[in-house]
């Protein structure tokens, strides 16, 4: 901890998401960016200098075993999450690992077993369950604002322009479903619960053999369903509709709400209600703040990976099996 009692974070890899989302949130939450590690010391040094991180470290292992680091953020390509998260847990370091926790179900199971075995805290970086917007939407649903929730229609698309991006590599476990389709899947888990009864998906393939335009359904008991659409080729779109028996909640961005995002309650015979989603706080901030409170001993952990990650991983695995059966060339 630093003199102010704040945990000292180490960042494993010079990832874009660390620069763009994690570090601004860390600063807002009052945390300490103590060190960044890269496979190349020069890359770590440049990343540290441009992002106001105290120290650059050569190699991930040196950071993981550094006794001055209290907690690790792991934003590596999906295929590397298992190896480095398990090493970090075995070194006794709490971890915030990027989503999806792993790209393959057996790896997820190994990571969760390591978290159980070591008793070390592990979170998967789905940050929206920590955000005030999801809390407000849950309350609207619980209060019956749209009747009973029966269907979720959820998109996550964005345009990927760089052919060298990790998301287009099958070896690094890219693909639209794992990269962004995991968000609708996790949202359905949050709102319908962990138990789904069927999975179907279809995809157009691209890159070096990954799904790049993907659509699918997760069936839940009593006919409830998630209908998801995700891809790496269209304009940014996270629009999501929560269909109830008496109306809809229309959410412009359930996952990373920004200052212009809204959620609307639409029901027959009532005026449409529109709420601002986010205020000015970056979407990662509430999650980072919570983790810091837990590490300081000021809060009980919520949304730990051992409690939340397996149903998402199982659903992604079942959807992947289905889309590989049904895939077409992009
Ligand atoms: N939660 C969210 O909102 C969110 C948003 C975007 C991305 N993500 C997740 O964050 C992770 C990183 O995504 P990103 O777009 O930030 O990735 P990125 O910019 O490509 O960074 C990945 C980092 O991993 C390291 N790395 C190690 N082996 C590598 C390899 N073989 N190829 C490429 N990089 C390698 C590199 O760091 P060094 O070279 O310095 O070692 C690289 O900077 C993914 O799991 C992704 O799903 C989450």
Image (cartoon, rainbow, N blue to C red):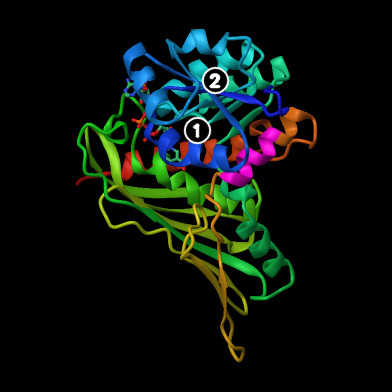
**Residue drawn where x is 49% and y is 52% of the image:** 256
Mark 1, ligand 1, within 8 Å: the answer is yes
Quarter for ligand 1?
A: top left
**Residue drawn where x is 46% and y is 41% of the image:** 21
Work out whether 299 lies above or below 275. Answer: above
In the image, taking residue 17 as reference, residue 296 lies left or right, namely right
Disc 1 residue crowd, few under 14, some 14–19, many 20+, Cα 10 Å: many
**Residue drawn where x is 49% and y is 62% of the image:** 259
Q: Determine which quarter of the picture holds residue 15.
A: top left
Q: Nearer the viewer, residue 38 or 126?
A: 38
Residue 98 - label? 1
Q: Which residues are magenta?
A: 285-292
In the image, taking residue 109 as reference, residue 78 lies left or right, namely left
User: How far across and how far down the image is residue 14, in percent?
Assistant: 39, 25
Work out whether 129 lies above or below 115. Answer: below
User: How far across and how far down the image is residue 217, in percent?
Assistant: 46, 54
Dot 2: element: helix
Q: Which secondary structure dominates the residues rendered in magenta? A: helix
Q: Quadrant of the N terminus?
A: top right
Residue at image mark 2: 85
Q: Nearer the viewer, residue 217 or 112?
A: 112
User: How far across and how far down the image is residue 205, in percent?
Assistant: 24, 42
Which circle's residue, 2 or 1, is located before the other in the chain?
2
Disc 2 residue crowd, few under 14, some 14–19, many 20+, Cα 10 Å: many
Membership of 291 in magenta stretch: yes
Dot 1: element: loop
- Do the residues under discs 2 and 1 have CB atoms within 8 angstroms? no
Membership of 201 in magenta stretch: no
Q: Nearer the viewer, residue 53 or 104?
A: 53
Q: Nearer the viewer, residue 253 or 31?
A: 31
Q: CA distance from mark 2 to mark 1?
A: 10 Å
């Amino acid at each position: 901890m630093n003199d102010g009692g704040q945990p000292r974070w180490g960042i494993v890899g010079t990832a874009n998401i660390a620069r763009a989302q994690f570090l601004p949130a860390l600063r807002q939450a009052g945390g300490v960016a103590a060190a960044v590690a890269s496979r190349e010391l020069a890359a770590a040094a440049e990343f540290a200098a441009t992002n106001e991180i105290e120290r650059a470290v050569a190699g991930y292992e040196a950071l993981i075993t550094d006794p001055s680091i209290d907690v690790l953020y792991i934003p590596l390509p999906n295929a590397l999450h298992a190896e480095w998260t398990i090493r970090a847990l075995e070194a006794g370091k709490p971890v915030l690992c990027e989503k999806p926790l792993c790209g393959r179900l057996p790896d997820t199971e190994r990571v969760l077993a390591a978290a159980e075995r070591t008793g070390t805290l592990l979170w998967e970086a789905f940050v929206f369950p920590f955000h005030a917007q999801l809390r407000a939407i849950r309350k609207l649903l619980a209060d019956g604002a749209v009747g009973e929730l029966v269907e979720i229609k959820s998109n996550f698309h964005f345009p990927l322009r760089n052919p060298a991006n990790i998301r287009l590599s099958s070896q690094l476990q890219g693909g639209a479903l794992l990269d962004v389709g995991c968000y609708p899947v996790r949202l359905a888990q949050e709102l319908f619960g962990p138990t789904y009864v069927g999975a179907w998906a279809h995809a157009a393939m691209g890159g070096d053999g990954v799904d790049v335009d993907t659509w699918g359904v997760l069936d839940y008991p009593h006919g409830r369903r998630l209908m998801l659409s995700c891809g790496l080729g269209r304009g940014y779109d996270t629009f999501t509709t929560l269909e109830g028996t008496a109306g809809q909640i229309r959410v412009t961005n359930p996952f990373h709400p920004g200052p212009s995002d809204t959620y609307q309650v639409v029901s027959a015979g009532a005026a449409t209600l529109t709420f601002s989603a986010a205020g000015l706080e970056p979407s990662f901030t509430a999650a980072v703040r919570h983790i810091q409170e837990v590490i300081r001993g000021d809060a009980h952990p919520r949304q730990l990976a051992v409690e939340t990650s397996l149903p998402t991983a199982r659903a992604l695995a079942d959807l992947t099996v289905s889309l590989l059966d049904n895939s077409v060339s992009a």
